[in-house]
Image (cartoon, rainbow, N blue to C red):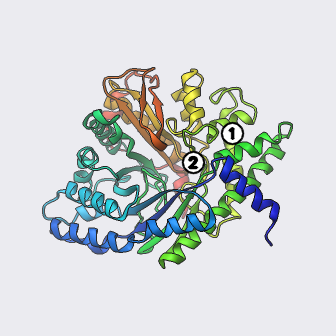
């Protein structure tokens, strides 16, 4: 039964508290585009994406207008491109990247994800060529996003791939130095990557997914912060209930939008990712939620505990509101995209070490973190390996999006603009892990991987 109070409260969330649908993402399988001739494969890729997503933007705009719900991004995710590179006689994946970019532009979407390789247990045909090409591919395209999965709870961590990815990230930053190192901001390195993630830059369309599918990512940090602020004297248990109820309303909106878009396009509705995705807008911040819960500044002692409570309550409230929950689902902590996180870094309270601790209980990991440009490949690789270890041992998705700011030092700042915000360049521990990283090989899977 519809409740008038709940309807009015949701309208207020939209008009005053930055509530929106962060993304409607269409996943498209490109497996039927495989072949050995790159020109033919590129033609089939462009045709399929154009055909499948032709009306994605217009259908989303119609739903946005009908219900008055802002839909910020319309995106596409595709089959990991390394799977198509494998069969090419002449392996030139950059041509595939340029095809993806043209298709994204022609359909009007913001980003297209899936220039990706899954190498958690080793390299298959096409993987090395794809990863090697990432810096140039991202420098030559505007909308293409890339990811590499280097570990999983079942497989362990591919240390060679971590080192490889670190070099690629550094090169991507160098090639896009004149564009705020934006190439590095479009690369995510995962452990336990999921197949139905609607959020960029890490989205790809998994091989277990339908041919086409609609996945929705909701937002709502501002709405959760406002709800918490109304209960200044609540106990922790009561606060958890407040967050759960708010997450239910936010996620219910995502379920509505996803269902309507999928019906309009005649495409299967996949999942709602109920993550709290912050923006640089004042008040639309996960850090400010934690501070409203009682922390003086995000990053002080108690931050990890408060984030654990928030993440758990969001999941418990959201899971009842959606037919299928998936993606990453929880609370994101991207430094540059969260006004409160930026402020905490500037104050010196939020450090990389504290962020790493927080990633053990949040949705993803070290996200949109800028480090000095002279940070070595080995240090970046070790950062990737540390984050992958947290994901592997805890059987959760973790990720790193790190931007080496070439020619800049700690205390400087990069301004990306838009939803990507601005990134204070953080101090990083530069004591060398070189010998450990250069051993190579694969860190074995933990005992908890043996579940059969």
In this view, the residue in front, 447 or 421, is 421
- The answer to whether residue 121 is left or right of residue 67 is left
Q: Quadrant of the C terminus?
A: bottom right
Point out residue 113 in the picture as x, y percentages from the top left corner.
Answer: 38, 56
Asked if residue 46 is positioned above or below residue 157 in the image, the reply reads below
Q: Quadrant of residue 255?
A: bottom right
- The answer to whether residue 68 is left or right of residue 45 is right
Point out residue 309 in the picture as x, y percentages from the top left corner.
Answer: 71, 44
Asked whether the residues under the numbered discs 2 and 1 touch, taking CB atoms below 8 Å apart as contact, a structural biologist would say no
Asked if residue 419 is positioned above or below residue 300 in the image, the reply reads below
- The answer to whether residue 130 is left or right of residue 236 is left
Point out residue 433 in the picture as x, y percentages from the top left corner.
Answer: 38, 27
Sequence-first tag of 2 and 1 = 2
Q: Secondary structure at mark 2?
A: loop
Residue lying at the far left in this picture: please name it.
Answer: 90
The Cα–Cα distance between marks 2 and 1, rounded to whole angstroms, is 12 Å
Point out residue 252 in the picture as x, y percentages from the top left corner.
Answer: 67, 63
> How busy is the neighbourhood of tag 1: few (under 14 within 10 Å), some, or many (20 plus)?
many
Q: Quadrant of the N terminus?
A: bottom right
- The answer to whether residue 419 is left or right of residue 235 is left
Residue lying at the far front in this picture: please name it.
Answer: 65
Asked if residue 44 is positioned above or below residue 432 in the image, the reply reads below
> How busy is the neighbourhood of tag 2: few (under 14 within 10 Å), some, or many (20 plus)?
many
Residue 289's disc number: 1
For mark 2, what is the residue?
277
Residue 317's disc number: none
Q: Secondary structure at mark 1?
A: helix
User: Residue drawn at (35%, 39%), measured in percent from left and top?
Assistant: 182
């Amino acid at each position: 039964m519809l409740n008038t109070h709940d309807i009015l409260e949701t309208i207020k969330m939209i008009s005053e508290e930055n509530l929106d649908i962060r993304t409607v993402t269409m996943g498209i399988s490109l497996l039927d585009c495989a072949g050995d001739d790159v020109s033919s494969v590129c033609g089939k890729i462009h045709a399929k994406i154009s055909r499948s997503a032709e009306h994605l933007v217009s259908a989303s705009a119609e739903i946005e207008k009908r219900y008055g719900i802002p839909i910020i991004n319309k995106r596409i995710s595709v089959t990991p491109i390394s799977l198509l590179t494998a069969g090419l006689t002449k392996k030139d994946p950059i041509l595939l990247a340029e095809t993806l970019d043209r298709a994204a532009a022609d359909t009007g979407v913001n980003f297209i994800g899936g220039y990706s390789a899954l190498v958690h247990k080793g390299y298959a045909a096409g993987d090395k060529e794809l990863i090697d090409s990432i810096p140039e591919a991202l420098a030559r395209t505007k909308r293409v996003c890339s990811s590499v999965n280097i570990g999983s709870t079942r497989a362990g961590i591919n240390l060679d791939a971590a080192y490889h990815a670190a070099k690629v990230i550094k090169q991507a930053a160098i090639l896009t130095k004149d564009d705020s190192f934006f190439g590095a901001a479009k690369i995510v390195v995962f452990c336990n990557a999921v197949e139905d993630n609607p959020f960029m830059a890490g989205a790809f369309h998994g091989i277990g997914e339908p041919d086409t599918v609609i996945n929705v990512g909701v937002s709502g940090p501002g709405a959760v912060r406002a709800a918490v602020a109304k209960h200044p004297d609540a106990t922790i248990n009561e606060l958890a209930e407040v967050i759960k109820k708010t997450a239910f309303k936010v996620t219910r909106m995502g379920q509505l939008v996803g269902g309507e878009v999928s019906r309009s396009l005649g495409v299967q509705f996949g999942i709602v990712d109920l993550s709290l995705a912050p923006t640089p807008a004042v008040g639309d911040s996960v850090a400010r939620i934690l501070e409203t819960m009682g922390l003086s500044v995000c990053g002080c002692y108690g931050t990890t505990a408060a984030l654990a409570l928030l993440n758990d309550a969001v999941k418990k409230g959201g899971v009842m509101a959606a037919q299928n929950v998936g993606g990453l689902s929880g609370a994101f902590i991207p430094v540059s995209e969260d006004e409160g996180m930026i402020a905490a870094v500037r104050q010196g309270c939020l450090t990389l070490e504290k962020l790493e601790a927080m990633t053990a209980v949040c949705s993803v990991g070290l996200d949109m973190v800028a480090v000095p440009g002279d940070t070595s490949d080995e240090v970046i690789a070790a950062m990737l390996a540390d984050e992958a270890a947290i994901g592997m041992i805890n059987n959760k998705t973790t990720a790193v999006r790190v931007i080496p700011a070439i020619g800049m030092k700690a205390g400087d700042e990069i301004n990306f603009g838009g939803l990507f915000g601005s990134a204070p360049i953080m101090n990083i521990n530069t004591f060398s892990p070189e010998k450990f990283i250069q051993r190579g090989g694969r860190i074995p899977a933990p005992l908890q991987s043996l579940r059969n």
